[in-house]
Amino acid sequence: MTVVQCGMGRQRGPGLDEPLRAWLEGRLGGRTAVSAVRSLHGGESPWWVDLTAPGGSAYSAVLRSPSSRIGPDQIATNAAALAVAEQHGLPAPRLLAADLDGREAGTAASLETVVPGTSTWPDAPSTELLLAAGAAIARVHAVTLDPQPQLPFRPRPIAVDDFARDRRAGKMPTTALLQLADERVQAIKAPDLPVVFVHGDVWPGNTVIGGGAVRGLIDWKTAGVGNPGVDLGELRKQVAIRYDDDAPGHVLEGWERAGGTLAGDIAYWDAVAVLNTPTEEYSPYATFRRDHFLRAAIARL
């Protein structure tokens, strides 16, 4: 992780050109000092900004600007989602400032609070944590919301990608299992209801945990509205790959307990989540675990 010390003069942090830095300093007020800036992803945005307020008190914030992975539209979506989260008291960062058209910052930018804790989950499965994660996303799904320009309808997790379509178009290799799953899903009418607020990319790295609890969901750049299964299927897939066959059931149980209702069409959303992954996962074992999860979903479709 890159760390660059910054003073209150005109020294620049990584990726913080003069208009962006001037906007940040203006939003913070002239007496707040930027003491350090470090990249949270590969030397580019988002940035962790350490700040020193008058009197010497220190705090931190997260600054987002466009990068090779994230465009201005996703920064706008993240900001819109954080506004909804604050309105409904959801566990998430709070938006401190935003310049979505870049008129002041020179580029789309937003500033948000830091949720204390860690996004590193334990190596061994924790039933308590899995239940808490399911409950956390149930709170998000308790919010009913109409589609908006920055929070559109999401038919799948991480909806900016469509790997199933890419495989159908021959842009990506496929397998017999993925093709079978795609054919089954395509033959089923997507569930219509309910349509609720969705995070869009729920995985351990986008949760902040502490003491066995989920303190907040972060990185809302693909949020929107859709079926709760968009988030449930994604997190169930993620924990199935990371842990064991019981882990997805604990996520579902936590969601159903918190929401006071049974989830529907779980097999469909499990398959949709898997289909929106690259043909080969980040390791052979992860691909094996993902395919094992997918076979179970197909058997229930």
Image: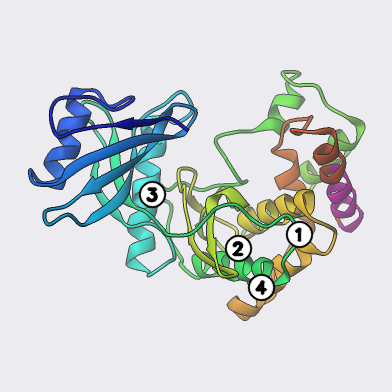
In space, the residues marked 4 and 3 are separated at their CA atoms by 29 Å
On screen, residue 32 versus residue 128, left or right, reads left
In 3D space, how far apart are the residues under numbered discs 3 and 1 (Cα atoms)?
A: 39 Å
Q: Position of residue 37 (x, y in %)?
A: 32, 35
- Name the disc covering residue 176, or none: none
Structural crowding at the residue carrying mark 1, measured as other residues with C-alpha within 10 Å and reported as few (<14), some (14–19) or many (≥20): few
Residue wearing tag 1: 124
Relative side of 109 to 258, left or right: left
Specify whether residue 68 is painted magenta: no
First in sequence: mark 1 vs mark 4: 1
Residue range corresponding to the magenta coloring: 291-300
Out of 148 and 68, give the one closest to the viewer.
Answer: 68
What predominant SS class does the magenta segment belong to? Answer: helix
Cβ atoms at labels 1 and 2 below 8 Å apart: no
Answer yes or no: is residue 105 visible.
no
Quadrant (top left, top right, bottom left, bottom right) of the C terminus: bottom right
Residue 56: x, y in percent? 17, 54
For residue 68, above or below residue 270: above
Q: Considering the numbered disc 3 on the image, is that residue within a helix, a strand or a loop?
A: loop
Residue position marked by numbered label 3 in the rendering = 148
Identified by mark 3, the residue type is Gln
Instruction: Give whichever of discs 4 and 3 has the lower sequence position.
Output: 3
Is residue 301 visible in the rendered image? The answer is yes
Neighbours of disc 4 within 10 Å: few (<14), some (14-19), many (20+) = many
Where is mark 2, residue-wise? 193
Q: Which residue is mark 4?
A: 254
Q: How far is mark 4 from mark 2, CA to CA? A: 20 Å
